[in-house]
Amino acid sequence: MKCENLEILLSGYVDNQLSQEQKVYVEEAINSNDTLRQKVEELHNVKQQLSTLVAPLPTDCSWDNFNTDLWEKLDEKKPTGMSLVQKFLFVAALFVIVTVSLFLPNFYTTNTFSLEYTPLIGLPEKSEVEHEVVKVNASIPKYEVPINIRYLKEANLSQREIQFLSQKGFVVTKNRFGSFNEIYENNQRNSIPSYVTVDTAISGFSHILGRLRIDVEEKALYGRLASFTEVIGHKLINLHKKIAPQHEKASLRALAFIRVASILLDLKQQWPEEITSKINKQVQEELTLIYTGGNDYPVEIVNSPIFGYAMDYSRFKLLRKPKNKRLERYIIAHEWYARCLFRTADHYSKVAEQYLSETRSAMLLLIATIATDGMSIWEEIHYILTALYGQADDPHLLDYLKTARDVYGPTITLDVLSQKDKLLEFCKAISRTRLPKIRSELGLQSGLRIFSRRSIGCDFILQQLTYPYVGELHLPRVDPSLLDIAVIMGWHKAKYIAEDKGYYEYKGYKSTVRKYQDRLEKELQPVNYPWGKGGLISLAWMLNSLKIPEGKGAPIFSHSDEWQARKLTSVACGLLDLSFGQPVFTGKSTADFHGTIEPYPEFFNRMATKIEHFEEVLHHIGYPLQTGVAKELVHYKKMLKELAVISSKMLENKELSDKDYKKLCNFVLGWQGKYGSATIQDISTMYYRNSSNFDNHLYAGVGAVYEMWVAIPVNGKVQLARGGIFGYHEFQSMKKVSQEKWQQLSPRPGLASWISEYAY
């Protein structure tokens, strides 16, 4: 360490106010450096001379009025020149004051850090958005499908399809389209009545939300993450100068971690050579793995050069898609923050020396955060991520802060790194605070992730419905399905299919499903504001509205078992992140339109409420709602509310007005830019890996858009109308399937078995 960096300790050394560890460190430096030794001697001399001074006490005033009397006497008497002795004493006193004011605060004040933190921005206990349920008295008269139903010729159905249509009131044909846009534009060109489906609304919402996330990441999150990384890096560098030698490894680990993030974000921050020389090798090796996706290795899951544990570097390769460099840097840097774990204990709650070392690194990151503006920046990022992607899965910085306050009290110092007993207590307390639910390459190990992986809830539940939680060693369940989530959501059709597939034969399946059903039912109560929560809760709240109406007064097709299977497909796809492509929603179209809409007004209404909650979040972070994709989202919400009204009129057997038709037309044709609906998503969560360390991936996604014809009364006459619905695929793969590869695959594997009940 350089001499000027040691000077801040000298005053404390002379006054015998250093810890034993710091005292030994300073003495070693003094013995080997003549300049420092000379400065210590000067400080000793000044201290000795000051100790001989005696200040006479005032005799003609009381202490109670000392300040007032002093200023009065000074005003009475003009100042005179100082003697040589007075000048010397003044200079000496000034030297001590300057020394203390410049050096002492840097050591003592900044090495005691307050753990009292009041969040500046936090998730509200409940959403301020209120939801008003749409109540409709369904009154569509009972009807049959006429033999010569209008638009039958345009449908060009086979005899088998006509028979299905006459029995069930709807039919899904062999015709496929690339997007929902394509099928409705085809309807408009050929004067075919359109049937606006909930699948169309889900797809549109996913595309707008996908673009919103990208915009928020680029315009709001990149800058915040860069600021966080920069201030934490700068503080860690300063803290490293004060770290005892035995804790240097923990400090360098934290520095290397932040250094990688700094380079990924392309920050121009200058780091001291004495630090970079010690961490550069590991940092460069880490960056090589990140940028190559681990392709230089037999398997893509290899040990991290910085942390030493297994990490799946292929995740970084799959993330490098955006052409916008700023956005790409943010995405990869955030993935780095989300994948790196500072472990406190293994999944048996055992604390090893390595975990203590990693926890020391985490504590340094915590201290660097609370000693700067880092916590308020972190909290803003955390708030945005929670709203857009779901709750954090692992303990995060606020968890660490609260636990540290419980264990150490209102303040903390760097001495915590040496207090092993307290550190063990902290590790055990963190493990009790929040256990991760989603397996990573490390299993279910407790520890700190600065920005945790987000969970919609499906990931965790899929793990809980596989071995070793469900099944036995001789009959393990290793292939979960999104069908399990629909079962937990209470979809009877999903339960019947699960029973037919033998899911309930696995030990523990029924009890596990029941447990999560009970939890979800409680969360979905209106008093819990489910629309204001992320992940599975808000999705289940929206999608479960498709269960109604199915009774008297509803269209004939909605009563069939095959229609329940069709809705199950909508539910499965609704649980996925389906955004692909960058279409812009204008909500304006000049085309003519005739047709009708699905009989689920409450679904459209709930989706609008969910968007209103997003508005609340965007307003909270200062994101402008009047421009860009946020404006599209607000407009989409307005149209969904209008669709809820139109759907209610349809169910009440009321005629639709020209304005209603115009609104429906604007909704399905008010898009600019082509896009494909086929999209794939890896929903596996490390629930299974074979002995070769290769992952068994679970993929779920949408293929082409299916053509569906429904027989429905429109202004008193039964006719055919055509709409688009999802096609759902789910399959296991030992190889990773990219979005681009999925687009090109034909035929696509893994078509859901229940689709054969209604599609040809």
Image (cartoon, rainbow, N blue to C red):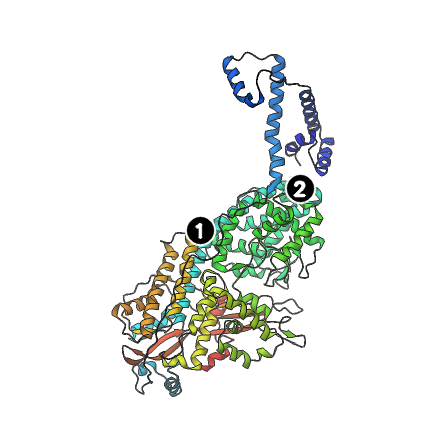
Give amino acid for label 2: Ile
Which mark lies nearer to you, 1 or 2? 1
- Dot 1 falls on a residue whose secondary structure is loop
Q: Nearer the viewer, residue 276 or 84?
A: 84
The location of residue 355, given as percent across then percent down, is 68, 54
- Mark 2 Cα-neighbour bin, 10 Å: few <14, some 14–19, many ≥20: some
Q: Quadrant of the C terminus?
A: bottom left
Q: Is residue 183 visible?
A: yes
Q: Which residue is mark 2?
A: 243
Q: Is residue 684 visible?
A: no
115 relative position to 170: left or right:
right
Q: Are marks 1 and 2 in contact (CB under 8 Å)?
A: no
Q: Which residue is mark 1?
A: 621
Q: Relative to 508, is 459 above or below?
A: above
115 relative position to 630: left or right:
right
Q: In the rendered structure, which disc, 1 or 2, sits on the residue that comes first in sequence?
A: 2
Give amino acid for label 1: Ile
Q: Residue furthest left?
A: 658
347 relative position to 674: left or right:
right
The location of residue 85, given as percent across then percent down, is 63, 14
Q: Quadrant of the N terminus?
A: top right
The location of residue 277, given as percent across then percent down, is 64, 44
Q: Relative to 103, is 91 above or below?
A: above
Q: Which mark is residue 72?
A: none
- Dot 2 falls on a residue whose secondary structure is loop
Q: Nearer the viewer, residue 618 or 320?
A: 618
Separation of disc 1 and disc 2 at Cα? 37 Å
557 relative position to 694: left or right:
left
